[in-house]
C-alpha cells in the first residue's frame, strides 16, 4: 500500500501545471486532496478529471483571510491534514531597469508571502499529524539569470525559508520539503508581470527541454512521501544546481555572458 493512501493533502496553485499534476498524482496514490486556486473553472476540471476525488476550493494566497477560510473548510471536511504543497506562484520576466518596486512587491506577495499565509494557516493541523510542509521553489533559487531577477529573488527567499523552517519544525515532527524544478511544462510563461493569464504568450524554452508535468508530479509526490529535504526536478535542473553549488566562478561567468547584449549579425 502506498504510504500516502488515506492521507489528507492540500495543494495551492492547483488549477494548472505542477499543482494540477500533483493533485492528480496524489489522488492516484490514494490520498484525499483539496485543490486550491483562484480560477474555479480550472478547479472544476481538476475535480472532473480526478473523478471527484480532488475537492475544489477557491483561494487567493495573497489574502491571509482567504487562505485561512479555505484551510478551515478543508480541515473540517477531512478532519486532519497530513500533506501541504505551497505551490502557487508566477514569474516576472523583465530586467530590473524595466521593472518598478511594485513589480517586486507583487512577485513576493504571491511567491513568498503566499507561502507564509499557507504555512501559518496549516501549521496547527500539520503539527497534530506530524505531517509534511512542501514548498515549490525553483532552480532559480540557486541561479539568478538576467531578466529573471524578481522571480529568482523570491525563490532564493523561499529556499532560505525552507532551510530555516526545517530545523524549527523538526522537534514538532513536521518535515519540510523543498521542491526545486527546472523547466517543466506549465503556464508560467503565459502569465504577465501583473499575474494575469495571457493565452497568446508562448514559452521560449524548447519543448524537448521541458519535463511533462505528470512526470514531474511523480517525482515531487515521491519526495514528499519520503519526507526528503529537497528534490531538484529535471536533469538539467540538477546540473545547474550542481554548478551553482560547486563552481561559483563558472556560474558567474555563464550568467555574465547570458546578460550581454548580442552583437548584430554581420552581413557577408
Image: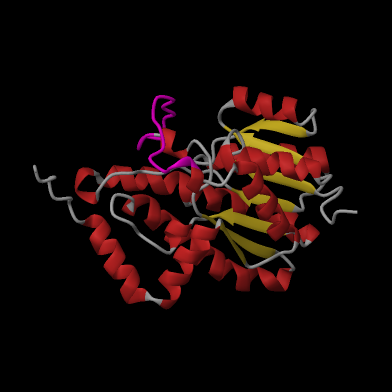
Which residue does the image show at 36% across and 75% down from the upper left? 248
Residue 36 lies within the magenta run: no
Q: Is residue 34 above or below residue 182?
A: above
Q: Please provide percent x and percent y for residue 60.
A: 54, 36
Locate the C terminus and report the quarter of the image it occupies: top left
Q: Quadrant of residue 165?
A: bottom right
Write the residue at 40% across / 32% down.
202
Furthest toward the front, the residue is 268
Comparing 264 with 116, the one in front is 264
Q: Is residue 193 magenta?
A: yes
Residue 201, image x, y percentages: 39, 30
Taking 154 as reference, is 102 left or right? left
Taking the image as shown, residue 191 lies to the left or right of residue 103, namely: right
Q: Residue at x 37, y 34 (%)?
A: 192
Q: Is residue 15 left or right of residue 206?
A: right
Tell me how many marks there are: 0
Q: Residue at x 71, y 73 (%)?
A: 171
Confirm whether residue 122 shows in the render. no
| Bounds of the magenta segment | 192-207
Q: Which of 23 and 72 lies nearest the eye of the viewer?
A: 23
| Residue 11 appears in the picture as rendered | yes
Q: Position of residue 261 (x, y in %)?
A: 17, 51
Judge from the rendering whether residue 113 lies leftward or rightward of residue 37; answer left or right. left
Residue nearest the viewer, comparing 215 with 208: 208
Q: Residue furthest left?
A: 267
Q: Tell me which secondary structure the magenta stretch mostly adopts.
A: loop
Which image quadrant: the N terminus? bottom right
Colour convention: secondary structure
Return the residue found at the far top: 41
The answer to which image quadrant residue 131 occupies is bottom right
Amino acid at each position: 500500500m502506498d504510504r500516502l493512501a488515506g492521507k489528507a493533502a492540500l495543494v495551492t496553485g492547483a488549477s494548472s501545471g505542477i499543482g494540477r499534476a500533483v493533485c492528480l498524482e496524489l489522488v492516484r496514490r490514494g490520498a484525499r486532496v483539496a485543490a486550491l486556486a483562484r480560477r474555479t473553472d480550472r478547479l472544476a476540471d481538476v475535480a472532473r478529471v480526478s473523478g471527484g476525488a480532488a475537492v475544489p476550493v477557491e483561494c487567493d494566497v495573497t489574502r491571509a483571510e482567504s487562505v485561512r477560510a479555505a484551510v478551515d473548510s478543508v480541515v473540517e471536511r477531512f478532519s486532519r491534514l497530513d500533506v501541504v504543497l505551497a505551490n502557487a506562484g508566477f514569474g516576472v520576466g523583465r530586467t530590473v531597469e524595466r521593472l518598478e518596486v511594485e513589480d517586486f512587491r507583487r512577485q513576493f506577495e504571491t511567491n513568498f508571502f503566499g507561502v507564509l499565509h499557507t504555512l501559518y494557516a496549516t501549521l496547527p493541523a500539520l503539527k497534530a499529524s506530524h505531517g509534511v510542509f512542501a514548498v515549490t521553489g525553483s532552480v532559480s533559487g540557486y541561479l539568478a539569470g538576467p531578466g529573471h531577477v524578481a522571480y529568482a529573488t523570491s525563490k532564493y527567499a523561499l529556499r532560505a525559508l525552507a532551510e530555516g523552517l526545517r530545523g524549527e519544525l523538526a522537534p514538532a515532527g513536521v518535515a519540510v520539503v523543498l521542491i526545486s524544478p527546472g523547466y517543466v511544462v506549465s503556464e508560467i510563461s503565459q502569465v504577465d508581470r501583473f499575474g494575469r493569464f495571457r493565452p497568446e504568450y508562448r514559452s521560449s524554452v524548447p519543448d524537448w527541454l521541458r519535463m511533462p508535468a505528470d512526470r514531474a508530479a511523480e517525482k515531487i509526490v515521491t519526495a514528499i512521501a519520503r519526507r526528503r529535504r529537497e528534490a531538484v526536478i529535471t536533469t538539467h535542473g540538477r546540473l545547474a544546481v550542481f554548478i551553482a553549488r560547486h563552481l561559483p566562478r563558472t556560474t558567474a561567468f555563464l550568467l555574465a555572458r547570458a546578460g550581454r547584449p548580442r552583437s548584430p549579425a554581420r552581413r557577408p
